[in-house]
Image (cartoon, rainbow, N blue to C red):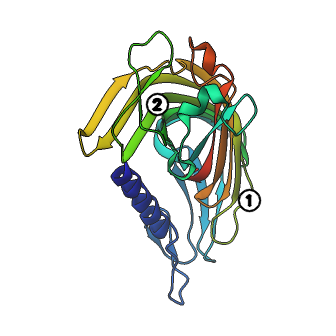
Amino acid sequence: MKRLIFTILVCVAASNVFAQTTPTDSTKTVITKDSVNIKKGVHIKLGFGGDVASVNVNDTAYHASKAPGFSFGVTFSRIDLGFATLIDNGSFTLSPKNDFLSYRQWKTSNFGFDLVQFGYRFNSSFKIYVSGGFDWTNIRLRKDITIQRNAPVLTYTEDDIHYSKNKFASCYLRIPLSFYYRSHEDDNGNCFRLVAGPEIGILLNGRVKQISEENGKQKFDDDYHFTRLRAGGFVRMGYGIMGIYAKYYATDMFENSPEQKGLRNFSFGLTFGF
């Protein structure tokens, strides 16, 4: 997971560097988004995935004109990297019955991204779209316990060995409905963006991953009573390709496990690639 996150961040940073390439000579040659050199005095229009960019090379700026219409395609965007927090019936402190899930806050993470989207653009500032991707929550447990597989309710055993890493994780297929607003671009082609809407998630799998001197690395897969269909809401805002996000799920984290009723998930952090 760490290698995957590092690779993604490097790719995002590299794409940002290339996207911000600007001309440096006195003839004011314009370098367009597809790296085509245009001679002075020429006026052209270029299309990018349904968007039309109008370029007048008498100056060094281009002005984007977003045409209304539907769009569909493969994407790699809305990359969320942040922290996950458990909320126990409105409290950030776990109740005694959920204390076995005590976790290390700075090592409990949320990571996700979108891979496909379909939407409709109303104008240059507003569009709506539904997308699909993946979302992981990794809880770094403090205690030396093992969450049990195939149990009638969420349960655990206390172990006599110490785990240097004890992760309790879930993976969901995420399907958000996004309402997207963007301001006018500045001279560098950047703008403020605000995205918000509801999101549903379909459970793909749960996992316990442990590392100890006695047993080495171990992985155990099960649904672990994670809610199979969760629902919540999100908000993202930022400038350029980077911003912040927050997500809250109104459904409980676990199902068919009465002791965990009211235990929910809140995530927040950085987001890349609006």
Q: Nearer the viewer, mark 2 or mark 1?
A: 2
- For this rendering, which residue is in front, 4 or 260? 260
- At 46% from the left and 31% from the top, the residue drawn is 170
- Report the front residue among 162 and 224: 162
Dot 2 or dot 1, earlier in sequence: 2
Picture coordinates of residue 37, whole percent (x, y):
44, 72
Query: Which type of secondary structure does the marked residue at label 2 adopt?
Result: strand
**Which residue is disc 1 drawn over?**
184
Q: Where is residue 181 in the image (x, y as percent from the top left)?
A: 73, 46
Mark 2 = which residue? Answer: 170
Q: Is residue 37 left or right of residue 85?
A: left
Can residue 179 be seen at all in this image of the molecule?
no
Location of residue 153 in the rendering, given as x and y in whole percent from the top left corner? 51, 13
Residue 116 position, x and y percent, is 48, 35
Image side of residue 29 versus residue 55, left or right: left
How far apart marks 2 and 1 lie (CA) works out to 39 Å
Task: Quadrant for residue 249, please give it.
Answer: top right
Q: Does 146 sit above or below residue 82?
A: above
